[in-house]
Image (spheres, helix red, strand yellow):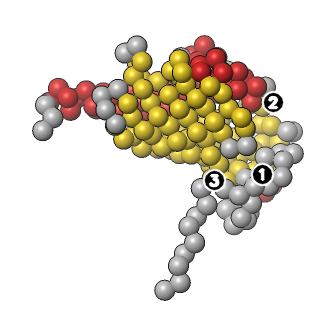
């Protein structure tokens, strides 16, 4: 059985990771590049469906700067963070979030999942890998059908694509 100190440390680590996720969204929306870079480990990786992504903290930041250069105002809202510890300095996470993004002359609304790994580097929890996938995404005029259309990921100017997290078919009884 874990000691009281170990149990308290795990709670503190969990809170720090949850704060890291919230900080990532806040500093992204605020275009605070220095604080955003500090969210990632030195050898971080970031990928997103339909985008190349980046490797290493500098590569991740180059990817994020490039992606954000086509965006106007953004609102990132985390819904939950599920954390599973793999050791004292490693954890996996699933973050569900909603995004509002000004892009392509319209406002896009999205539900996304981030599949993360976290590492404690230099005494601070950071994102080691982040893979963003879309549940659904579209401009406000198509959101009404974005949960019922099989091609419900609709970036402005791109061909509609299926969800990265489609609902599993319901089996007939």
Mark toward the start of the polypeptide (2 vs 1): 2
Q: Position of residue 129 (x, y in %)?
A: 53, 32
Question: Of 21 and 62, which appears nearest the observer?
Answer: 62
Mark toward the start of the polypeptide (2 vs 3): 2
What quarter of the picture does the N terminus occupy?
Answer: top left
Q: Position of residue 34 (x, y in %)?
A: 60, 13
Q: Residue, x 74% and y 60% (percent of image)?
A: 151
With 108 as the anchor, is 17 left or right in this view? left
Q: Please indicate, yes or no, whether residue 47 appears anywhere in the rendered image.
A: yes
Q: Position of residue 80 (x, y in %)?
A: 47, 44
Q: Position of residue 158 (x, y in %)?
A: 84, 47
Mark toward the start of the polypeptide (1 vs 3): 1
Question: What secondary structure is found at the residue carrying circle 1?
Answer: loop
Q: Please indicate, yes or no, whether residue 15 appears anywhere in the rendered image.
A: no
Q: Residue, x 59% and y 19% (percent of image)?
A: 57
With 128 as the anchor, is 98 left or right in this view? right
- Other-residue count near label 2 (Cα within 10 Å), few / some / many at <14 / 14–19 / ≥20: few
- Taking the view exactly as shown, the residue that stands out farthest to the bottom is 173
Examine the rendered structure and indicate whether residue 95 appears above or below residue 32. below
**Which residue is the site of mark 3?**
164
Q: Are marks 2 and 1 in contact (CB under 8 Å)?
A: no
- Other-residue count near label 1 (Cα within 10 Å), few / some / many at <14 / 14–19 / ≥20: many
**Which residue is the site of mark 2?**
70
Q: Residue, x 35% and y 32% (percent of image)?
A: 14
Residue 154 badge: 1
- Other-residue count near label 3 (Cα within 10 Å), few / some / many at <14 / 14–19 / ≥20: some
Q: Give the label, 1 or 3, closer to the camera.
A: 3
- Per the model, the C-alpha gap separating discs 2 and 1 is 16 Å
Examine the rendered structure and indicate whether residue 35 appears above or below residue 23. above
């Amino acid at each position: 059985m874990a000691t009281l100190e170990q149990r308290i440390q795990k709670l503190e680590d969990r809170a720090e990771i949850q704060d890291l996720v919230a900080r990532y969204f806040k500093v992204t929306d605020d275009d605070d590049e220095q604080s955003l870079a500090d969210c990632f480990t030195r050898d971080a990786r970031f990928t997103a469906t339909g985008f190349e992504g980046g490797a290493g903290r500098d590569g991740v930041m180059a990817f994020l700067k490039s992606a954000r250069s086509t965006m106007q105002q953004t609102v990132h809202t985390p819904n939950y963070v599920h954390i599973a510890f793999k050791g004292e300095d490693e954890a996996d996470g699933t973050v569900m979030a909603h995004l509002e993004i000004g892009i392509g002359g319209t406002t896009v609304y999205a539900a996304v999942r981030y599949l993360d790994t976290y590492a404690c580097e230099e005494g601070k929890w950071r994102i080691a890998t982040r893979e963003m996938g879309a549940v659904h995404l579209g401009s406000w005029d198509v959101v009404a059908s974005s949960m019922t259309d099989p091609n419900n990921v609709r970036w402005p100017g791109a061909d509609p694509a299926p969800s990265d997290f489609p609902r599993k078919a319901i089996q007939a009884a």
